[in-house]
Amino acid sequence: MKRAKSIVGVLVLVASFGLKAQTFCSMTFNSPDEKISFNKNLSPLGYKHVELVPQNKDPEWFSKACKTVSSCDILVVSGHFGGLFFGEQSSSTISLEELTRARELGTCPAILDKPKAVYLMGCNTLSSKSPDHRSVNDYLRVLVGDGFPLSLAEEVAAARYLSFGQSMAESMSSIFNKSQMVVGFESTGPLGAQAAPRLERAFKESSTAEKKTTGLGKNALLSAFKGTNLRVVKPEVRKSDELKKAALSVTDSALSLNAWRQILKPGSISENYDFLIKNQNHPVLVALARDEDEIARNLYEKMLSIYQSSKGLSEIQVKVLGFMKLHNLIDIYTYEDSLLSVVSSILSKEIDYISADQLCTIVKKNKEAGLLTKLSGNQKKLLLSSSYGPYLRKCAGEVVLKQTPSKAYLCLLNRENHDWGCLTSNPRELDIEACTLAKSRNADPENADDMMWYCYSQMNDNRYLTRAGCLELTHQFNLLGNQIKMNWNCLNRVSK
């Protein structure tokens, strides 16, 4: 009998050594509260923990994590969210675009394919397009106020509230389509400090079997987060995802053509807006829009509807106009008249940080149209009298230099010192021209961003940095996380 027990013990021991340890992975951009709760409750069950976000500012951190991590059985992502995750605790970010690209290329199976459960602990991570207490333009202002670059803020606001393109919930379900469940929030979600006690309650109510598979049980989660906007979904590969994959096939031309025809049906164009804009130069799309009148007509009608519904989201309107011009759905005169109409709409109100950013983007990308020269007399007066006037003239391609160059600029121009030395030896003589010149000669993206931070701190401390200058500095940053933080500083720590 003792011998039998000992054999059983050995077999159990061998089996246990053969078991692969489970891994709980986290991406922590803001407070660590959620990560701590998961680690506290899962480590006694044999889970090992891996934090994927590094302490340094490595812009390639995600692609490196995809290569170095063998498998994530559970993934917890925590931070502020609005089309990308970010936070005060890290300069790193991860965007929907990066995650989607990794999914499409199949370059990150350990993080995107392996998790049985994914916890997206941020606002709107699983939002549909259902209306809530905000309008699309309200949300746009909130995102820009949080530091989001305008182009990203517009995309996120449209994804949340407008009827075209994918919702956040659809995007996340496509990215993590091999998971058993994805957890997130329909609208605003609790901060980490408020979420952690609810997670503790959910862990207490979850069975051991649930903890060993998905970390938490669905019913326990919904109970613990009752009264919040928490959602739990079971992702699946959608038909539209399969069509997009087929449309981009390079080995089966018949499959690709048929997929494009399905995508370009009247009822599918709006849903696939993001895909169409992203792949607008695809040869099959170009050929179908050129050769088939019905497809061209459908595209024109749906894109015109999207353009009209995007009032106030100038970058989206310009993208739609560019798509229509590329495929000859409108002529060059209609295109330029429509651009001028967008600009005029922006100028109908006083120019502020957001509208100046909108105007700069439009005129910079359409310099050949000479939009500023076509404004009415009153509009030109409004633009030139604005504190953003010189900045907008630069955006249009004009050379706007001070009559007397600063000492820092002359130092850089004459190479009197190394670039950092020219900046640090003239802290009270810094200006936008000197800072952008120094940055342009710095091949190291992190070090170049440090130059911008130094310029911002010195110019702001000495109280001669304007919001217009701050906006110009913001666009010089290489790392998106730094750009977001700089935008926030411009709006909250710089006087008008």
Image (cartoon, rainbow, N blue to C red):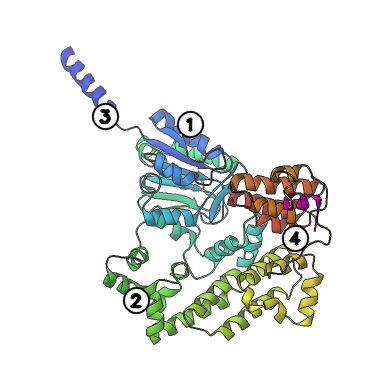
Residue found at x 63% / y 52%: 477
Name the residue that disc number 2 marks.
261
Q: Are marks 4 and 1 in contact (CB under 8 Å)?
A: no
Is 274 inside the magenta-drawn segment? no
Percent x, y for residue 488? 68, 52
- Which mark is first along the chain, 4 or 3? 3
Percent x, y for residue 226? 52, 48
- Which mark is first along the chain, 4 or 2? 2
Name the residue that disc number 4 marks.
468
Q: Residue type at mark 2: give it.
A: Arg
- Give the extent of the magenta segment: 405-413
- Secondary structure at badge 1 equals helix
Name the residue that disc number 3 marks.
18
In this view, the mark in front (3 or 4): 4
For marks 2 and 4, give the CA distance.
46 Å
- Category of crowding for the residue at label 1, using alpha-carbon neighbours closer than 10 angstroms: few (below 14), some (14–19), many (at least 20): few
The one of 82 and 465 positioned closer to us in this rendering: 465
Residue found at x 79% / y 65%: 387
- Which mark is first along the chain, 2 or 1? 1
For marks 1 and 3, give the CA distance.
25 Å
In this view, the mark in front (2 or 4): 4
Residue 228 at least partly seen = no
- Category of crowding for the residue at label 2, using alpha-carbon neighbours closer than 10 angstroms: few (below 14), some (14–19), many (at least 20): some
- Secondary structure at badge 4 equals helix
Name the residue that disc number 1 marks.
40
